[in-house]
Image (tube, coloured by chain):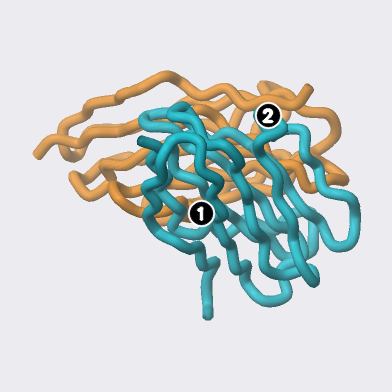
């Protein structure tokens, strides 16, 4: 597709369950980012991947959060043992090579933990 | 560390009013600066960008100038419309790296 695709668009899960959120970046983009946007809040950086380099995981809020990027393309963000405070919109973005390029965002996955 | 500070919202204006949303940054080196917009129910999309000092980014009547001396990138529009109601995010991409830093966002309401 032409843009960043995220799935599912909405996810409702029970507290304590694990969830996986998927991101398909724009083909050829070397950088991929995950952000969290809580209701009425700004963007909280979670993690980014750049080519074959080790990911920057400095924004992950706890060890219940993990992410991987397979083959330099698709990424999965996994949240284990979900808590109600994990409810938010999770945004993925990808960016082509080059320092002055912009990031392109997906529509996000709205996660609700009940 | 690198950071972006935006004026707090919400900002409420009448149609055709002048808009300024302040953004200042702290960064080492020479970051690229961006404004993103998020319309209700939609994802973030790039509004404009500037990649070096004194550059002016512009789009859809919005402008912002990269001011290195004041470390600012204020967003302006001369005459806002109801359709400009959205949340606006200032952001920087760090020099030599790929980390992206976003401001907290400023919500704009434009009344008819």
Q: Name the colour assigned to chain A in the rendering.
A: cyan
Most distant residue in the left direction = B112
Q: In which quadrant will I find the C terminus of chain B?
A: top left
- Whether tag 2 and tag 1 are in contact, CB under 8 A, the answer is no
Q: Name the colour assigned to chain B in the rendering.
A: orange
Q: Residue at x 43, y 29 (%)?
A: A84
Q: Where is residue B5 in the image (x, y as percent from the top left)?
A: 57, 22
Q: Which residue is drawn at 58% across and 46% down?
A: B56
Q: Position of residue B83 (x, y in %)?
A: 22, 50
Instruction: Say left or right for A75 vs B16.
Output: right
Q: Which chain carries label 2?
A: A
- Whether marks 2 and 1 lie on the same chain: no
Instruction: Say left or right for A2 vs A30.
Output: left
Instruction: Say left or right for B62 vs B109.
Output: right
* Rendered position, A52 above or below A19: below
Q: Quadrant of residue A38?
A: top left
Q: Which of A10 and B81 is in front in this view?
A: A10
Q: In this rendering, does residue A49 appear at all? A: yes
Secondary structure under the numbered disc 2 in the rendered image: loop
Q: Which residue is drawn at 72% across and 70% down?
A: A73
* Rendered position, A60 above or below A18: above
Q: In this rendering, does residue B20 appear at all? A: no
Q: Which residue is drawn at 65% across and 29% down?
A: A61
Q: Which of B63 and A40 is in front in this view?
A: A40
Q: Which chain carries label 1?
A: B
- Residue, disc 1: B46
Q: Label 1: how many residues lie within 10 Å, few (<14), some (14-19) or many (20+)?
A: some
| Numbered badge on residue A74 | none
Q: Quadrant of residue B93?
A: top right
- Residue, disc 2: A62
Instruction: Say left or right for A84 vs A91.
Output: left
Mark in front: 2 vs 1? 2
């Amino acid at each position: 597709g032409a843009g960043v695709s995220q799935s599912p668009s909405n996810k409702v899960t029970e507290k304590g369950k694990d969830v996986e959120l998927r991101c398909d970046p724009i083909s050829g983009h070397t950088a991929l980012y995950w952000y969290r946007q809580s209701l009425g809040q700004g963007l909280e950086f979670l993690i980014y991947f750049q080519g074959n380099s080790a990911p920057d995981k400095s924004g992950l809020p706890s060890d219940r959060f993990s992410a991987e990027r397979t083959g330099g393309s698709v990424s999965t963000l996994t949240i284990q043992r979900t808590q109600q405070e994990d409810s938010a919109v999770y945004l993925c973005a990808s960016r082509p090579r080059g320092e002055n390029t912009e990031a392109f965002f997906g529509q996000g996955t709205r996660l609700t933990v009940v | 560390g690198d950071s972006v500070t935006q004026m707090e919202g919400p900002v409420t204006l009448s149609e055709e009013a002048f808009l300024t949303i302040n953004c200042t940054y702290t960064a080492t080196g020479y970051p690229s600066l961006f404004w993103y917009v998020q319309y209700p129910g939609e994802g973030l999309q790039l509004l404009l960008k500037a990649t070096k000092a004194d550059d002016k980014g512009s789009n859809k009547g919005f402008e912002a100038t990269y001011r290195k001396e004041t470390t600012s990138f204020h967003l302006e529009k001369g005459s806002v419309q109801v359709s400009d109601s959205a949340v606006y995010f200032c952001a920087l991409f760090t020099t030599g790296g790929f980390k992206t830093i976003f401001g907290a966002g400023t919500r704009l309401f434009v009344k008819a």
